[in-house]
Amino acid sequence: MARFPLLARAGEVRHLGLVAALVLLALVGLATRPETFATYSNLVTILSLAATIGVITVGMTFVIIGGGIDLSVGAIMALASVWATTLATQSYGPVVMVICALLVGTGTGLVNGLLISYGRVVPFIATLAMMVAAGGLAQRMSDRRTQLVRPENSAIVDLSTGRVLGIPLVVYVFAAVVAAGWVLLNRTTFGRRTYAVGGNPEAARIAGIDVRRHTVLLYGLSGLCCGIAAVIIMARTTTGSSTHGHLYELDAIAAVIIGGTLLTGGKGTIIGSILGLLIFTVITNLFILNGLNTSDQLIAKGLIIVVAVLLQRRGLGSRSP
Amino acid sequence: MARFPLLARAGEVRHLGLVAALVLLALVGLATRPETFATYSNLVTILSLAATIGVITVGMTFVIIGGGIDLSVGAIMALASVWATTLATQSYGPVVMVICALLVGTGTGLVNGLLISYGRVVPFIATLAMMVAAGGLAQRMSDRRTQLVRPENSAIVDLSTGRVLGIPLVVYVFAAVVAAGWVLLNRTTFGRRTYAVGGNPEAARIAGIDVRRHTVLLYGLSGLCCGIAAVIIMARTTTGSSTHGHLYELDAIAAVIIGGTLLTGGKGTIIGSILGLLIFTVITNLFILNGLNTSDQLIAKGLIIVVAVLLQRRGLGSRSP
Amino acid sequence: MRGITKRFPGVRALDGVDLEVEAGEVHCLLGQNGAGKSTLIKVLSGVHQPDEGEVRFGGEPVRLAGPTAAMRLGIATIYQELDLVDGLSVAENVFLGHERASYGFVRRREAARAAGELLARLGHPEIPPNRLVERLSPAGKQVVSMARALSHDARLIIMDEPSAALAHDEVANLFRLVRELTSAGVAVIYISHRLEEIREIGDRVTVLKDGRTVAVGLPAATTPTPEIVRLMTGRSVEYVFPPRRPRPAVPEAGGRDPEADGLGTEILRVEGLTVPGEFADVSFSVRAGEIVGLAGLVGSGRTEILETVYGLRRPSAGRVLLDGRPVRPGSAARAVRLGMGLAPEERKSQALLLEDSLADNITLAGLPRYSRLGWLDRRRALADAAEQIAALDVRPADARRPVKTLSGGNQQKAVLARWLINGRRLLLLDEPTRGVDVGARAELYALIRRLADAGLGVLLVSSEVPEVLGLADRVLVVREGRVIHQADARDLDEHRVLDMIMEGSLS
Amino acid sequence: TSNEPPAASKPAASQAPAAGSDNDKPGKQVTIGFSAPAADHGWIAAIAKNAQAEAGRYSDVTFRPVEPTNDINQQISAVESLIQQKVNVLVLLPNDGEQLNQVARRAMDAGIPVVNLDRVFPDKLSYRTWIGGDNYGMGVAAGHYIGKKLKDKGVSNPVIVEIQGIATLPLTQDRSKGFADALKSYGFGVTAKQDAKFTVQTGNEVAGNLLQAHKKIDALWNHDDDQGVGVLAAIKQAGRNEFFMVGGAGSANAMREIKAGGVLECTVTYSPTMASSAIRLARLIAQGKGMGDLVENQVPQSITLASETITKENVDAYLPLGFES
Ligand SMILES: Nc1ncnc2c1ncn2[C@@H]1O[C@H](COP(=O)(O)OP(=O)(O)OP(=O)(O)O)[C@@H](O)[C@H]1O
Ligand SMILES: Nc1ncnc2c1ncn2[C@@H]1O[C@H](COP(=O)(O)OP(=O)(O)OP(=O)(O)O)[C@@H](O)[C@H]1O
Ligand SMILES: [Mg+2]
Ligand SMILES: [Mg+2]
């Protein structure tokens, strides 16, 4: 946990295992597909594809460090994308669409937080219920149809097609969210308190931290990330749909845990989560470059997850018990 | 935790909330579909539908009380059903098919357990990896096709069509697994150790319990339950397929938690889990009877889950902190 | 504080308690385990809301709606259960909840510097403010807790058993600080089960019993011990340490005639045991009926020695023989089968299933006894548990009560009872009286002695030198992972042992 | 898409003329039970909508749909409950024909005729009539379009990429086989294939990666126009246009793209109007009538729709039939 200058270097040791796993995957890519893997456009593609879950993973990292879990991220993203692409919303133009997605995401997240904090429903169940309900609501709003972003609002689609320095704008959005998440977690009282709330809620309460309020904010933050992810998926697919984000929660949680965050809370890093996620994204890319079929992809993916986790523990070295 | 005689009665108070939720649902059923809901054949339908996940839920209860989680149950069930319906297996007749399903389930579960105990991979990740890999293997073995139970092995199908006292045999299998699970958890040293291992693994280890071995056995048990569930799904659908059991893990975990088992381990009951599951199944049945569309069904389901949890907490009354 | 009443579901933890503390004094709170001391101070620091009663501070009635409200008034608390966050650094823990920050951004350098100053004031400049708290020893964590209390500009500092995790010299350090505070006019509420500390530092004493005040404002220095003990326990405790067997004719005569000194055969022999980085070349033996004590500073490696004997750690050299047979390391299950039992240092985290019943806890290590083909003989288990509960006088004597509702001393008895139901050869006791009140302590001492008299070998670790000297037959002095001296307990006195564990030399 | 002017999303078949007979006249009152997978996909949604709308056209039909689900176990229960309710005839689009076979057979045994929609039951005793699309034929149509066009261009060793739907569905395998067989007749083969999951998002992800794997592509067949929206977006994002694309199913959106002229040149139909036809057949079966244009007194045992090829030339004729994804 590189939170103080001198620890910073030592802290990075934590991620050595993950970096090693990524390097290994890259070597496999170079060996099997030398002509395509290391190209600029392929790397950009990997990052663009990682952007959606990546943003969600940042929010999930906060929630899990804070001692919770959020199963509803995929459904919230779907709901936000649907709400932002209804005819009514679209009539107000792209800016309102973005604001709508962010508000819907944040609002739904806050409802999760209130249920958990004040309703005292365990996070797993509260967010599972939200996953089911938000998914249903998204279907209902969209009448189960895929809603196209209308041509007059194509400014949203430009986020994925528009490039600066050859890199699509969605990648910048992704990077900005990661950077903001890192600063928030490591440099602000909100972030430091998140560790306290997750690691020892009783101690946090005794120290005068409003644990309930903080928990509500954490889920709100996760919801906000889902809203941003909804904007990205709208840009990537040119649509809003209730099928967006299916099973994202599992991938996001897995990325966070592979990144070294404890499911019990109180420990973890944004960088680890993003590295964990990139491992997933690079695996998929490698498989498709090599033309593996889905069944083999799945078998290999299972094995790679286990190997990545074992490598990550080595990276922790003697610091793990 | 009704582990000593006199506590047994007090223990049942725990489930009052769940029973109340079920009664409420039943009243809704009687009010909306008086002519069909309370019929014998509808109740039998509910139980047959509950049997597959029900058996899995029993294994999941053990794993969660023991401090773990098993995301791979659906995939293991699919793999077992596929393996048991390959032409090669089918050529040995129905008994071998059943044994094959049970062995595949147990074996895969044991691999989970070994990864977690001796490989020290956190349960969430180990079983997630297994979920992905077993799913892929099932696709591969079946060549992504649905495998029919051959006519000469129709003894397996008879489990769902054959009836004793008007009740299909699968319901008896379900009941037997629940009863066996209850006895194992409440009346054997294995069950006692499960509570100890989940409640305080360090204390259990120092008290001379082989925590690692016990953990391996718990996942093996969960795998065995998946094997049994595979037999039931083969009987119900007359097929083995890699698509069986999709998302069963979420339903099973939710049922266990709604049933009052702590996700942190050390506490919980089989009866609670089964009540939790029946709530899900009755909800689905009510929706079918009332012809609700999926979106509304999902929204309602999300709300009902939250209400059930709140009711269940009331049922716990003063015993919760 | 006047007429404070606090009810928890099923218990009335406080029942009209009065407490009055003056500026500049050290006011001690005494009482048995579960008397309500911690609950009282939690009311005072805003963690619990009282059901009845009134709190006045500086003459004004105040409402302590939450921890922040108390802190704002200048009430700072060092809690009994450590209240630190493992995943945060020392500095972050010190300022948790009142971070040095501007616009929500932590001023990290300033926080580190300020934390460093506080630690230096506490006599621990060596603790780096940037280190993660999880990497500190229990004593180090206690120091951080104190630094946090000091970081508030407090007019009243409450310390709930601050010395439980501290070694002897650390306690002296703590007292120096307390005197510094009181001379600056700060009031201190001090809770401890060690009467000698109360005598040394306390001005006045308030005694709680079963959630009621039984004595207010007794002079700390002059009230006689039996009087205090009587107030706390409601009865008189005549002796503290039980009598030993008669002194053997030839001490340390093992070898020629093992039974000559009234002790039995050798049960445990440890030869050249070494765990790199923890301890080296440790050799000793324990005989039937003998209590062997390990004295040493916190962090000297005694816990590790016990754990290695028990098979929880793998030694790099040396061996452990139980009844002459080598114990292969690697699993506690094997040690248990061979007849060892360990009562670990951290009762709650290492020994107890807090949610489960007393009976479940007592029978945990004896499950094979109640298993017939895996079937649990619940009647016999319950009967055995009840028998031990009666024999050890566990209160309340209700086998079905969840163990988390028991007081510390009774929980400790439950841990001991666990090992008594299935005929142990050797008991390893790590700090068996930590956090246990005087009355229960005397009972535990008597119990341990009875067990030894019945033929068990006992290996005892305690940070309280008088306890080791009073209870053990033979004492090993451990310093920095080495046994530097062993002798019959009657040939040692407290002063000499303290010198040895601190200086490493014989004075 | 639902956010188009409402007029365009009217189920197409309801505007189609009735068969040339007096079959449309009210007859015996019948209850039609209906079960299909969950409508999380435009095509399936169109199926449900068409069925509902078609049933609504007849005063003598009581429509009894059950909760759609993607879980086999639940669909079995749903059908069981329809059998209990003793409907006159069942229209079933199973999640998987083989897995629902047994319960369909039970319905038939209970005297309830089953109209098997699209995904076929393996056992002919399990249904009275089957009506569905021709998945193999769809692959063949796409294969012929691509093969012929590349042959005409004189391309040798073309890079042909295929994006499938859900890999575990038999229909996917049929489509792939038809595609490969048709290509073979031109001496071509599929260079790479991957499956998306019938959703826009997976279509986008898979296509994004596939376009990286093959820097130069000659032709691309995407099985499904729903996921095709995501595929087209990925092609735009990669800035690629050196190849042409063929779609599948025939959504209105795909037709508009074809009309506008772009990468998507053609789509091969698999029309959800079959659901409307199935309801009509079910009604006729229950009323014991035959089909007006046929000589037979009874409805035939099986009806296979042809897969048609829609290109810029004929797209205007098909636009009214396109379903909104
Ligand atoms: N949160 C709680 N819920 C229920 N009961 C509690 C709670 N906290 C304390 N108690 C009960 O209140 C009583 C007083 O406990 P308290 O911790 O104040 O004792 P204490 O005097 O500090 O004892 P010790 O010397 O062991 O620290 C005990 O019976 C205890 O079991
Ligand atoms: N300041 C410190 N920083 C980091 N680790 C420490 C520090 N002090 C002690 N430790 C470690 O803490 C561990 C536990 O020491 P512990 O206090 O349990 O020893 P002990 O001699 O058994 O003392 P006791 O049983 O009296 O508590 C040891 O492994 C030691 O290396
Ligand atoms: Mg206390
Ligand atoms: Mg120790």
Image: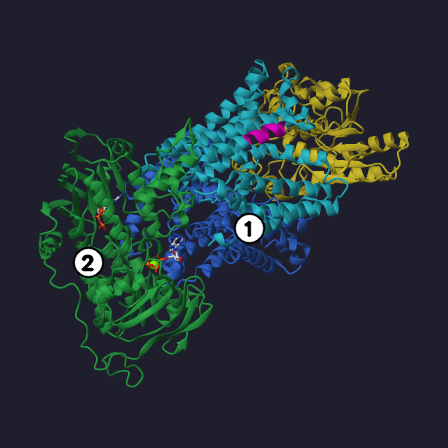
Chain colours: A cyan, B blue, C green, D yellow
**Does mark 2 have its CB less than 8 Å from ligand 1?**
no
Quadrant assignment for the N terminus of chain D: top right
Q: Foreground: C487 or B307?
A: C487
| Chain of residue at mark 1 | A
Question: Seen from this angle, which residue lies furthest bottom?
Answer: C256
Q: Secondary structure at mark 2?
A: helix
Write the start and end of the magenta stretch as one range.
A170-178
Residue D229: x %, y % from top left: 68, 27
Q: Secondary structure at mark 1?
A: helix
Residue D102: x %, y % from top left: 61, 44
Disc 2 marks which amino acid? Ala
Q: Is residue D109 visible?
A: yes
Asked if marks 2 and 1 fall on the same chain, the answer is: no
In the displayed structure, would residue A150 be above or below residue B194? Answer: above
Image point 35% across, 50% down: which residue?
C140
* B231 falls in the magenta region: no
**Residue that carries the numbered disc 1 in the rendered image:** A315
Quadrant assignment for the C terminus of chain D: top right
| Chain of residue at mark 2 | C
